[in-house]
Structure formats: C-alpha cells, structure tokens
Amino acid sequence: MATPWRHCWRWTTGATSTSVLETICGFNGRSATFAALSLRGTGTVAGSGKERLSFRPEDTTSIGNYILTSRHKSRLLYPTPKPCCCKRIHSDAKLKDPFTLAQKDLNHLYDDIKKELFVTKSELKSLCDYYFDGKGKAFRPMIVVLMARACNIHSNRDGDLLPGQRSIAMISEMIHTASLVHDDVIDGSDKRRGKTTISEVWGERKAILAGDFILSAASMALARIGNNTVVSVLSQVIEDLVRGEFMQLGSKENESERFKHYLEKSFKKTASLIANSCKAVSILVNSDPEVQEIAFQYGRNVGIAFQLVDDVLDFTACASQLGKPSATDLKLGLATGPVLFACQQFPELHAMIMRRFSTTGDVDRAWQYVLESDGVDQTNYLAQSYCREAIRQISLLRPSPERDALIRLTEMVLTRDK
C-alpha cells in the first residue's frame, strides 16, 4: 500500500520556526522576499502552521513583475549572488553520484531505442540512429530512472524499476532527440553535440521526417504502457514543445510580460518533458496526487534551472565546450535571461530585443552589454532559486540513495560547463 501523504512530512526536518526551504537551503534575507513573491502557497505543513509553497507554471507572472518592475538603489536586482548553497548543505559523502547510481538502468538505453526505431530502409535507419550513438549524456532518462526508484521506495516497494517506468525513461530520450532534430531545422543549426546536424548531412526535408518518425515510435511505445493517465501526461509534452516553439517566434514589448513569456517558454520547451516524465513514473507506482505533484515540481524546477544555466553558457562557454557555436541565441534573435537582466542596466537593449538583434552590430553590442552587466550573475542566481525549490520538493519523499542523488543533481545542474 502507498504511504499516506501525511507521512511525507515525516521526511522533513520537523523545524517549526523556519520554512522547509530555509532549513534545507538557508534561503533567507532578501532572497526570501523573492521566494515569497514567486512561490504560491498550496497547503500547510502538518503540525507547523507554516504554509506549504509550490512553484507552478502560471506563477511566472509574479516572478516577472518582481524582477523587471522593481527598482532598487543598488545596481543589482538581487543581492550579490553567493556560491550555491547546495554543496554546502548537502556535502554528505554518502550522497551518490546520479549518473553512477542510474548507470545500471541506462546500460541498454540506446540499444532499446534502436529496437524501437528498427526499419529495413538503410537511409532512414542511419538518420534515426545518428544521435542515438551512446555518446549523449542521457540526462533526462537519468532523472526519470532516479525519480522512479525514489517514488518506488517512498511507496513501500523495492527500488527496482517497473517495465513501464523503464519505458518512460526511454521515451523521454526519444522525444527530446526528436525535438532537437526539428529545432536544428527551424534554427538552421549546423552543429549539435559536437557533430554536424542531421539537416546539414541529409537535408531539411529528411531531417523533419526523421524527427517525425522518432516521435511516432515514441508514441507507439507510450501506448504499449497501457495506462491512459500516463499517455495523457506525456502527450502534454508534445503540445508544450510546439507551443513553446511558437512562443519563441514571438516577443513582448512590455518588460514584465517579456520575462513571464521567457519563463513560460523555458518551461514548455525544456522543463515540461522532465516534469511530466517524472510525474508519469510516479503515477505507475503511487495513486496519491500529492506524491505525483512532488515528482512534477521537482522536474519542473530542475528543468527551468537547466535552461537558465544553458542560456548563461551561451555567453560564458566556448563553442568547443558546448558542442555548438556560442552566441547562438542572440544570432537567432532570442532575448534570454542574461539579456533581459542586462536590459535593466542598459535600456538601449530594449530596442534591439524588439527588432530581434537584426541590425548590423546588434549581436556584438548586446553581447558586450551582457558581459558588462550583472545579467549572467542574476540568471545564475535565479537558477539557484529554482534548484532550492527542487530540493525542497524532493526532500518530502522518504530518504533513499536515489532521492539524495536527485538532491545532488541540482548542484551538477548549476555547475555544469556544457
């Protein structure tokens, strides 16, 4: 029988004078003001009288309003960013390396995907297998595997994966890769993961068809799981990917609306897949909607943090580290977190954003403004805030090596360099 929700609070610190988030991450002072503005109360911690807080996709309005309409005497929108507290708080040597802990379940990931994509036509096979060469990080399947095991243990089961959970990990990588193939066509990219893109090698038409074929194979694997709720949850990912791509094609003139737009797009294009995949594996083992919400919110917050760091790396990492050209977003006309924060110190960026950096010299000047501003630091700080909330959410589950690995993963998200 699944553990009742009220027992979830047993795995918190039990502190009553501070919030769970403050206890886990030392989230206080002025940064707590940001938390109060950007988090929505959704319940009460049993026995503490404290309001339980939770990020939700629609909460980006308050985040955007706070970030882009507040005017401080200091040139910083946030206090000077400090090193991430995750490593300091969770420095226990017992915390497992996430990749090592999930490795056993991921050993045959790409072989299983290739079986799903089996075709007799050699060219289509080459197209579909191109990115499934075993050299990817398998970041999303790793999170899904760890979340599945953590939820299984929380629900008084052994940690072994159910067949459906293993399939969801595979499907998450297939959906992600198909989206990359399509993105490269839309963006006209010639490099991905350190190699020439499919669209450059085989042409745009065949690349689109290959992406469609991978999605169709993922859909068939999803149907075979035989759970209508899981099918509905993961189908939402496909819708979000398309809506997020359309959002990326547009822009907002109002500054607060612009940041809300950016965060919503980041959720739909990046975080939705992680969040809904985590929710899907929890559904298969636990009918408690509160546990499913924990899984979703962890994936959502880690996913948005991952995208924020990715946007920072476009300014701070060289092309050899990224496996793709740097300054890509500016060249595509996209205003990401570092640019939106820099706009507060360099208002001339506003006009560039509205014309999508299309005038000669816009990209170079915008790049320089970002580097001269606090945009990178503030985006990193915002990513830390999302990771703090991810830690708070996952800490509500019963302790397990997999749960602790998911906590450690937040540190790895914030410190990655590619």
Image (tube, rainbow, N blue to C red):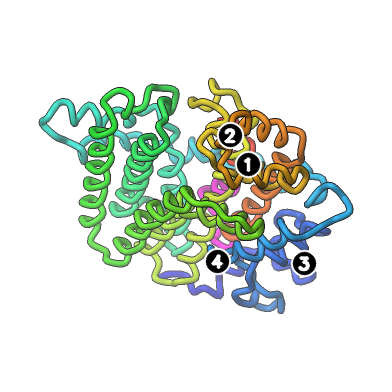
Q: Quadrant of residue 379?
A: top right
Amino acid bearing label 4 = Glu
**Where does the image place residue 386, in percent across and percent down from the top left?**
63, 53
Characterize the local packing of mark 2: few (<14), some (14-19) or many (20 or more) Cα atoms within 10 angstroms: few
Q: Earlier in the sequence, mark 2 or mark 1?
A: 1
Can residue 243 be seen here? The reply is yes
Is residue 205 placed above or below 240 in the rendered structure? above
Characterize the local packing of mark 3: few (<14), some (14-19) or many (20 or more) Cα atoms within 10 angstroms: some
Is residue 283 placed above or below 108 in the rendered structure? below
Given residues 390 and 256, the one toward you in this image is 256
Identify the residue shown where x is 56% and y is 38%: 310
Residue under label 3, please give it. 18
Q: Earlier in the sequence, mark 3 or mark 1?
A: 3
Residue 58's mark?
4
Judge from the rendering whether residue 29 lies leftward or rightward of residue 318; answer left or right: right
Q: Nearer the viewer, mark 4 or mark 3?
A: 4
Q: Is residue 410 magenta?
A: yes
Asked if the residue under mark 2 is in contact with the one under mark 3, i.e. CB atoms within 8 Å, the reply is no
